[in-house]
């Protein structure tokens, strides 16, 4: 809500989420969140403006690719292995088969911690991509380790969970009325910008600048 044009930013963001069923607005929205990361890491205290719409779409597509690579690949591998073990065990039909099926189920249950790990890593990956301007930067293991193993980043990842709960409660209350329901996309946009601001601040504190030192960004959202 900082800056003179915050109402306009909020209105545009809410409208994009309201039109998310058209798909393209989703990519624009994701691109804006990447831009929030970039501006935060660069030290800006005011959210970015809505401009360079083509660039927003491109950044949104990149963010989608990053999320798919981090989330879809391990999911497919784990579910594939688990389903295979369950199928073999069921076909065997004896004690050994039951044991295999049990291992298969346990393998699929590994998705829970794996997906949490994905949720933990993706914000840092997107932050590095936003700073470097390259899709490959999202997979820079050395940089990610430098950031994600810090307590600041750990807290920054946990806080959005709290924000998400609060936003969802507000949304559930608003949706009880027609007028309130129309406000939900705007509330969701506000919450997402706040969350990505937190991610950017945590990343900026430990990511090196061109000079090799961590950036010094104010810690107030």
Image (tube, rainbow, N blue to C red):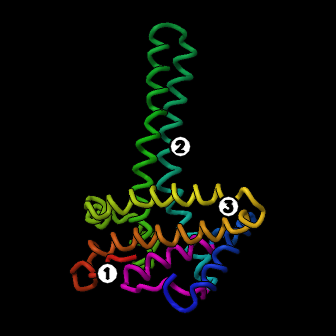
Mark 1 Cα within 10 Å, few/some/many (few <14, many 20+)? some
Report the mark closest to the observer, 1 or 3.
3
Residue drawn where x is 26% and y is 77% of the image: 208
Q: Which residue is mark 2?
A: 76
Badge 2 element? helix
In this rendering, position of residue 72 left or right of residue 12: left
In this rendering, position of residue 70 left or right of residue 24: left
Give the magenta part as a residue range. 28-52
Q: Quadrant of residue 83?
A: top right
Horizontal and vertical percent for residue 133?
45, 79
Q: How far is the residue under mark 1 from the one under mark 2?
A: 40 Å
Q: Quadrant of residue 156?
A: bottom left
Mark 2 Cα within 10 Å, few/some/many (few <14, many 20+)? few
Tell whether label 3 touches label 1 (CB within 8 Å).
Answer: no
Q: Which residue is mark 3?
A: 174
N-term-proximal mark, 1 vs 3: 3
In the rendered structure, find residue 64 and report the number of the disc placed on it. Answer: none
Residue drawn where x is 47% and y is 46% of the image: 74
In this rendering, position of residue 59 left or right of residue 95: right
Badge 3 element? helix
In the rendered structure, find residue 218 and report the number of the disc placed on it. Answer: 1
N-term-proximal mark, 3 vs 2: 2
């Amino acid at each position: 809500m900082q800056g003179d044009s915050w109402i306009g930013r909020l209105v545009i963001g809410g409208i994009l989420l309201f039109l998310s069923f058209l798909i393209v607005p989703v990519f624009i929205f994701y691109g804006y969140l990447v831009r929030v990361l970039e501006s935060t890491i660069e030290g800006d205290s005011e959210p970015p403006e809505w401009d360079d719409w083509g660039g927003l779409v491109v950044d949104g597509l990149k963010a989608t690719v990053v999320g798919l690579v981090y989330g879809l690949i391990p999911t497919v591998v784990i579910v594939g292995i688990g389903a295979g073990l369950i199928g073999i065990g069921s076909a065997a039909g004896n004690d050994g088969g039951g044991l295999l099926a049990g291992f298969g189920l346990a393998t699929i249950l590994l998705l829970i911690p794996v997906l949490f790990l994905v949720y933990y890593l993706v914000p840092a990956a997107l932050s590095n991509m936003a700073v470097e301007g390259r899709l490959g930067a999202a997979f820079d293991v050395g940089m990610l380790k430098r950031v994600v193993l810090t307590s600041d980043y750990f807290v920054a990842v946990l806080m959005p969970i709290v924000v998400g709960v609060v936003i969802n409660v507000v949304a559930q209350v608003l949706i009880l009325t027609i007028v309130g329901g129309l406000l939900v996309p705007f509330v969701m946009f506000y919450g997402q910008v706040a969350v990505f601001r937190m991610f950017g601040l945590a990343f900026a504190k430990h990511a090196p600048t061109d000079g090799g030192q961590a950036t010094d960004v104010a810690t107030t959202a």
